[in-house]
Image (tube, rainbow, N blue to C red):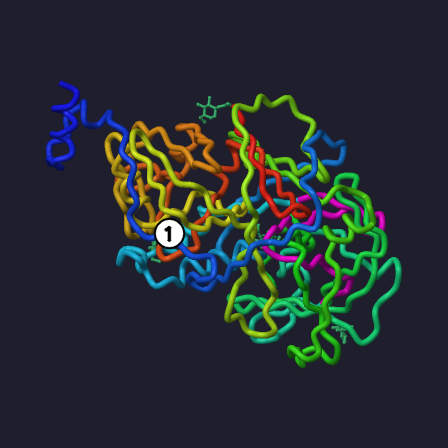
Amino acid sequence: MKALQLAFCLLGSVVITASCANLPRVRRHAPDWDLAKPMNGLSFERAKAIKEPSNDRTTMHFSHLKGIKAKPGQQHSGVSALSRLRSSSTPGSIKQSFQNISALTAASTQYAIQCGWDGVPVWLLFDTGSSDTWATKTGFKCSDGTGDSHNEAACGFSTPYIDGFGHGQIDELHFYLKYGSGEHISGPMGYSDVSCGGVSVSKQQVGLANNTYWHGNNVTVGILGLAYPAITSAYYGDVGQEAPWNAMSYTPFLTSAISQGTIDPVFSVALIKNSTDGVIAWGGLPPMDWQFRGYAKTDLIIANLVGQPETAWKYSFYTIVPDGIRWDQTTDTTKYPYIVDTGTTMLYLPPPLAESIANSFQPRAVYLYQWGTYFAPCDAIPPHFAIIISGVEFWINPADLIYHDLVDPLTGYCAIGIASGGPGPYILGDVFLQNVLAVFDVGAAEMRFYSRK
Ligand SMILES: *[C@@H]1O[C@H](CO)[C@@H](O)[C@H](O)[C@H]1NC(C)=O
Ligand SMILES: *[C@@H]1O[C@H](CO)[C@@H](O)[C@H](O)[C@H]1NC(C)=O
Ligand SMILES: *[C@@H]1O[C@H](CO)[C@@H](O)[C@H](O)[C@H]1NC(C)=O
Ligand SMILES: *[C@@H]1O[C@H](CO)[C@@H](O)[C@H](O)[C@H]1NC(C)=O
């Protein structure tokens, strides 16, 4: 009987019987992606290991991350670079071109981290997509897109502002960051003591913004850049004269912390369920009594933005290649790179996968073009869904796959946690990160994941 059913299913009948649906299906819908091949504005390289993997052990160095729901015009850091790539993508499905900007904002969360800046407590944006660390300088000029000055509050930074560099300014050097939105930040560079979660770096090279066009969140006063220890850019010469020949690279915060011997070359992130908050631990795992169900490690790949204007902030993203995706009885083993990003709420998958998974909600989720993403009845039953990394299935809690606070007013449907990433980049966002403890072992060039209950 079993054999007969199998034969029936293999014939590809339109009628899927209950017994067919229970048979595991493995499929590939595209050739495996090639590391050497750029994808929609990103190039990839295997990160180089400089030491053996660290033993994962609890560290007392950790910081709480405070989630801030991003509002329109408020996405800075690597988050905005990723959002821009997604929204400017040539659609893999035509639907993508109708993407509403408001959908993007609902789909991102910024995280703030409290650090000491020459001993002064400040909230900084936590950003794994950029490497520069900067804060706002006392007496800064807040201007708008046309260059006209406004009062400081209009730029939306929190306080306290920073008066100067604890270890002196670097003459002739400044930093300049420009965003796709037209926003920009510039100012002098110097050395300050920066400490976050008990990890202190003395004489870290940092920027102080003295001239800004910025739509801030009123929570943070700058950015802590934690991108893969890559080349950062500072510039010699006058503001406005930035070019490759006057760029100067320097050691960013995380690399300094590692080279000053403060921590092992590892940090780990755990986002807290049912909350926008999280924890980052420096040099190990956060001291929390989570029960781990599974563990996997995989190579760390670095994705870099290509074709950026020379004066743009340099972005790079922590990236992995999972073995595949599993939902209900289906496993898709096509290999794609996925950026691991705390700033993105949803999971962005290749369009055919997103479509199949949306269809496997009961009742099925539908694509609402005005939002640019999928919605399902709020009481729909999500599929059993896992990301497979190095042979281990990391299951996503079904409750995390439906957003009860993101409701389409016309249909009354709720947004689901799976979205189409068009031609890329594909992203493992908070939906995934809330179900794991993610270890970024930059020293050994690998990522490790522990699945959480
Ligand atoms: C999408 O954008 C349109 C036009 O800007 C706006 O009227 C509509 O409310 C937006 N849709 C949603 C779901 O926010
Ligand atoms: C900001 O700092 C730069 C670099 O040190 C300096 O050239 C510029 O005059 C300053 N601008 C303001 C408005 O203070
Ligand atoms: C920040 O505060 C300013 C002035 O108080 C206000 O106009 C602005 O809307 C606030 N921005 C956000 C994102 O809350
Ligand atoms: C999370 O929130 C949902 C609804 O808001 C609730 O049903 C669920 O019990 C919460 N889970 C936890 C672990 O608090």
Q: Is residue 58 magenta?
A: no
Outermost residue, right direction?
167
* Residue 259 to residue 84: above or below: above
Residue 304 screen position, x and y as percent: 54, 61
- Tell me the chief SS of the magenta region: strand
Give the SS element for disc 1. Answer: loop
Residue sitting nearer the eye, 121 or 49: 49
Query: From the viewer's perspective, is residue 265 above or below residue 72?
Result: above
> Between 251 and 329, which is closer to the camera in this rendering?
329
Residue drawn 71% across the image and 57% down it: 133
Q: Is the C-beta of the residue carrying label 1 under 8 Å from the nearest atom of ligand 1?
A: no
Instruction: Judge whether residue 132 is colored magenta.
Output: yes
The residue at the far top in this view is 1
Q: Residue at x 60, y 44 (%)?
A: 446
Q: Is residue 386 left or right of residue 375?
A: right
Residue 38: x and y in percent read: 45, 63
Q: Residue furthest front?
A: 3
Quadrant where the N terminus sits is top left
Q: Characterize the local packing of mark 1: few (<14), some (14-19) or many (20 or more) Cα atoms within 10 angstroms.
A: few
Q: Where is residue 210 shown, x and y percent of the image?
A: 73, 67
From where the camera sits, is residue 74 visible?
no
Q: Residue at x 63, y 60 (%)?
A: 155
Q: Quadrant of residue 40?
A: bottom left
Q: Position of residue 174 (x, y in %)?
A: 74, 71
Name the side, left or right, on which 29 lies relative to 190. Answer: left
- Residue 229: tell me if it is visible: yes
Under mark 1, the amino acid is Asp
Magenta residue span: 113-140
Mark 1 = which residue? 32
* Among the 4 quarters of the image, the one containing residue 437: top right
Q: Residue at x 54, y 58 (%)?
A: 45
